[in-house]
Amino acid sequence: MKDQKGISVEGLGDGDLNPSSVLSQIRTPYDDLLPEVDDPSAQFYLDAMRIYLGLSTGTLSFEDALGATDILKQNPEFNRSPSNPIQIPINKHYESRILENLRTLSKFNLVNRDSIKSAYSFAFSFPDAPINQQDLDTLKILSDNPRISISSLAKTLGLSSRTISKSLERLRLRHDIRYVALLDETIWNLQRVLIFFTIKDGVDWLSIENQLSTFPFLKTILKTSMSDLGYMSVIVPGGTKNIDVFLHSVRNLSSSIFEYISVHRDIASGAECNLSLLQGDKWLFPEDVKIALDSAQNFSIRESPRLVYSHGRDSNFTQLDYEIASTVKLSSRASTRDLVTSLARRGISVSPKRLAASLRTLYNRSILLPYTVFKLGLASSLCFEIICDDTWKHRILGVTTMLPKTVFLLSARGIILWVLAPSYHQVEYYRMFRALEQQRGVDSVQLIMTINQKGSKSILDITENLPFGKKGFSAPSSALDLGAYITDF
Amino acid sequence: MSRIATKRKLLDSVNLFSLVPLVFAQTVLSSYFLPKHLVIFIKLNCDRIVMCSLGSGALKLLGRLAINPSLRQSQLARNLGTTRSAVNQLWKKLEKYNALRIGGILDYGNIGVRFIYGWAKDTANPITLQKFTRWLKSTPFTTTIYESQITSANDSRIFFEALVPDGEYLNDFFRTLRSFERAPYHLNVFFQHALEIGVHLNLGLYDGTKWQFDPGFRLEASLDGALPYAEILPVSNAVYQTTPRKPDLESLVLVSLLERNYRATWKNAVQQFETFGLEHPSARTLRRRLCDYRKNMVRPLLHIENIGLSKTIVITLEEKNTSNLHKILRAQSILFPKVRTFSGLNSIALILDIPDESDWLVISTAISNIIGSPTKMCTFIAEKSPIRMHLEDIALYIIQRSKTK
């Protein structure tokens, strides 16, 4: 029988449609390694592993995995740690790491949430296989133009389309390459707000995190046990009034919960990479960035980074355009047919022609900015919050095209940089950016370091039940009062 | 200038200036046919080429020594089923290329000395930390300083170790440390005397060229899995530090010699007394004392270098020594390739030597996941060359000062 999300479940009786029990019916050859737990938050990660293993071993179809993931998202733990197993490339490396970590859990008889969560996240942080020259050349072109067709790619590289297809497959399977996009959500009256914070002494972070995760507009929280500093990313619908309500509620909480708060409203964002730094399997350190960040040196931007600006509400863009854009955001190289199917799965019917027209406008107006996601040995994620003046924003923006891989967000107060770096250059990047604090015009540089980039909720999940009108998405102002969700501290 | 100050100055200058010609030499040589594991190594007293990889014979020898460093070459030969001459040859090679040495670890309280460890972090003013570091380098009792390259707390830190004679010297040392906490410095300083010192070298993880060390989930799971058994897990190769007793100069001289060279003979002892400017007892007495100290005061310790552990990580945790976390870090330090642990009443520090390819951030993440609170813990990558003084240097200072009084 199929459950409400269309997942085929063997041996499941009528009425037995509890989400956890539905997911536990997914069969994999490694079921004996998956422990039984009572804690739903621990179960979340086991279910995520189960879905991944089902996909990788072929016991779960992609369609069923999509349905399973929708059920997985019902687990409250998803809000704390938005992990989507179907977005992770299916390959034997990840599969064997998951199995190895499951065996380690069993060996040490660990069944608590933290251990299982670690088993899951550590499975996806391991050194990449070296990339061959042909695949690297393919990737270089894709990084500049993620939407380039296979035939154009083949022509540019002087290779056959078949060879390019194989290259793309290798890039996907071996090197975790994904094609996504940045989106100007303000077109539909959705404002991204990033808040960096530290917690007051004595405040129980676990409890706060649990309560924060119930805030329906939370996209992601990142706070590691290594550092006091964390951040949360929030999508605020409904325009200026609701943004003010939200920010006011955050400031109210600062007297009781937050020691430090630093708010950034997204003015523009971008993503860049510099694959010329990759020589063989080693990344070179971009010494010229050090020079570029030295205020004593004259600096002019060699290559401007591509940006998505926050334009604000444009009533020419409908909710359908939003659905299309948000779907493409997750997979910018998806074919028209795949996008139509994807939308149909969510009950949205659109013709290929309409879809193509929408995409053309979105790209031409720079509302969507495609980019490639890859690891390629960039094992460390360094998130720098740099509070600085416009001159320094411009300067730092200019160096993003010289760094191995960055995603960045501009606000009125400064720039947030997520720099992916190889572990052997952690110290160099750290020192290079921390040294900016000595520069006039830079107020502060703070850092959060992680070994994996934290996942975030899809914007579609956040806006699923929001009303949409002429002014775009809206929500009652009371829903934006963060204080209403954090009551127990 | 005192011998200690001269040594410190020389250490600083070697690090800075000796590097250039040797890096050039390495670049030239490595462009030819030299195997990857050949490295140019810089030491204080001579520049020499050393081998990083070890053959199976060397590994077996070191494996035996790691378990029992007091084994003589004849015993090793019997153990390994080979001749003493072969062991001697291997030993000399290891001495030359890997600085093999049998030193000692001891309860410093027996010679009237406290082992102090601690750390300081800068909040807003890095100059204050520099001043603190300068003071540490200038005191005759600081044995090691680790300066951070990058820390998990996003600040700058100094970790230090000191051997300080009990009494007036110790009071002065603490007084100065505390003065850095007040105006005008307002430095955040934490220090304790060690209740226990541990040293572990896990050669079982080493195959001669590479270390099998997984700093990620396996490390975290091993620590997490052992937590419920923290009370009963044994702590091996650790020396409890007793309350210092009144030292006598003779034991100071001999113990400091044994700490450097566990196998020191009575002739070495005579030389030591002469260096210290003291009259030495008879050969018979010296032989008896050395034997006695080996039996009761100094435990042998294997020292080996150039085995691919080129990165140093410092982990500090403010946690009562009665807590399970504290106990587990003491007991489970055997998970690491090479580690020194210092355990005090309210804190524990681990100095890890790990392979260069091991990711500090992964280790830091794994351990912080167990600890759960960033306020109590910090990990950092240390700068490559800590200043290192030995008990001998401190003993010399104490004896010279006692003479002038």
Image: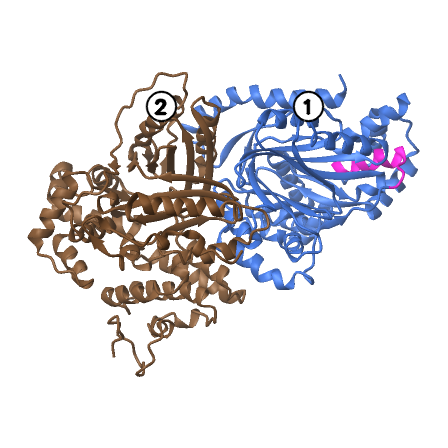
Q: Quadrant of residue A313?
A: top left
Q: Is the residue at mark 2 from the same chain as the one at mark 1?
A: no
Region rendered in magenta: B245-261
Residue appearing at x 25%, y 68% in the figure = A64
Q: What residue type is labelled 1?
A: Arg
Rendering quarter of residue B163: top right
Quarter of the figure that contains the C terminus of chain A: bottom right
Query: Which chain is disc 1 placed on?
Result: B
Question: Badge 2 is on which residue?
Answer: A391
Magenta region, main secondary structure: helix
Q: Does the magenta stretch include residue B260?
A: yes
Q: Do the residues labelled 2 and 1 touch (CB within 8 Å)?
A: no
Q: Which of marks 2 and 1 is in front?
A: 2
Point out residue A209 in the picture as x, y percentages from the top left corner: 47, 55
Assess disc 2: are there few (<14), some (14-19) or many (≥20) residues with their C-alpha within 10 Å of its C-alpha.
few
Mark 2 residue element: helix
**What shade has chain A been given?**
brown
